[in-house]
Image (tube, helix red, strand yellow):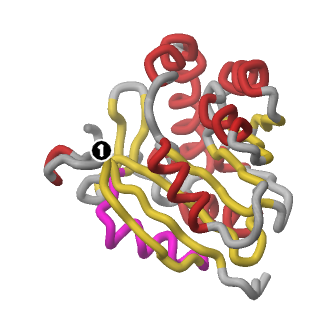
Amino acid sequence: MNNPPHDPLHADSLHAITRRTLDHYDASAEQFFEGTRDHDVRQNMDALLAAIAGTAPFDILDLGCGPGRDLKAFTERGHRATGVDGSARFVEMARAYSGCTVWQQDFLDLDLPPGQFDGVFANAVLFHVPSSALPGVLRALHGCLKPGGVLFSSNPRGHNQEGWNGARYGSYYDLDTWSEHVQAAGFTLLDHYYRPPGLPREQQPWLATVWRKAEKSEE
């Protein structure tokens, strides 16, 4: 894995990173969908939904919705799901597959309606955000949630390194460092676990965390 760019704070550098990653997904969209269509993420969906207070149906934002697998699943459970993805091809596919509203937005330039969602489902997506841009992304997610809203994230875990893995950029955190980032954006940790379930820790590469926004927002 290569080192991060010499000037990771430069906006043009950050957008170049996300553009290269998105180009990879645009070019391999159909292959990606066929390879992930049957992945079982019910544990993650259940963790998000169980943490949301109030009465269903809930308004869910699927961040990095890809071709729409989880949008469709949330809808089939009776919830109101909206997707957002930076890949133009994924957005097109997700709209067709799920029938949901899907916005095309680069995560570095998120423009989300304030206080609209009960939950944000960020499954296997936030690790693509360069660490220097992560605080802004997390603040945007905090802002789009209703007071008391819930953020779910699942990322491949690591030892706080970041860089290129082939054509995709990734940041790989341990629980402590990831928690510092998300807490700094105004969230409180509710739960964490490792995936896939039922395996020794060394065979669980995914770190899942569940977070709540304060009931009384200071925004």
119 to the left or right of 5? right
Q: Left of 73 or right of it: where is 115? A: right
Write the start and end of the magenta stretch as one range: 172-186
Q: Main secondary structure of the magenta part?
A: helix
Q: Which amino acid lies under the numbered mark 1 shown in the image of this protein?
A: Pro
Residue wearing tag 1: 196
Residue 87's quadrant in the figure? top right
Residue at point 56%, 12% (across, down): 30
* Label 1: how many Cα within 10 Å (few below 14, some 14–19, many 20+): some
Query: Residue at position x 30%, y 44% from top?
Result: 196
Place of residue 112 in the rendered image (x, y in percent of width and height, measured from the top left): 80, 55
Q: Position of residue 174 (x, y in %)?
A: 29, 62
Q: Up-down: is 184 above or below 166?
A: below
Q: Is residue 63 left or right of residue 115?
A: left
Residue at (47, 40) in percent of width and height: 41
Above or below, comparing residue 88 to residue 52 in the picture: above
Residue 192 drawn at (x, y percent): 38, 66
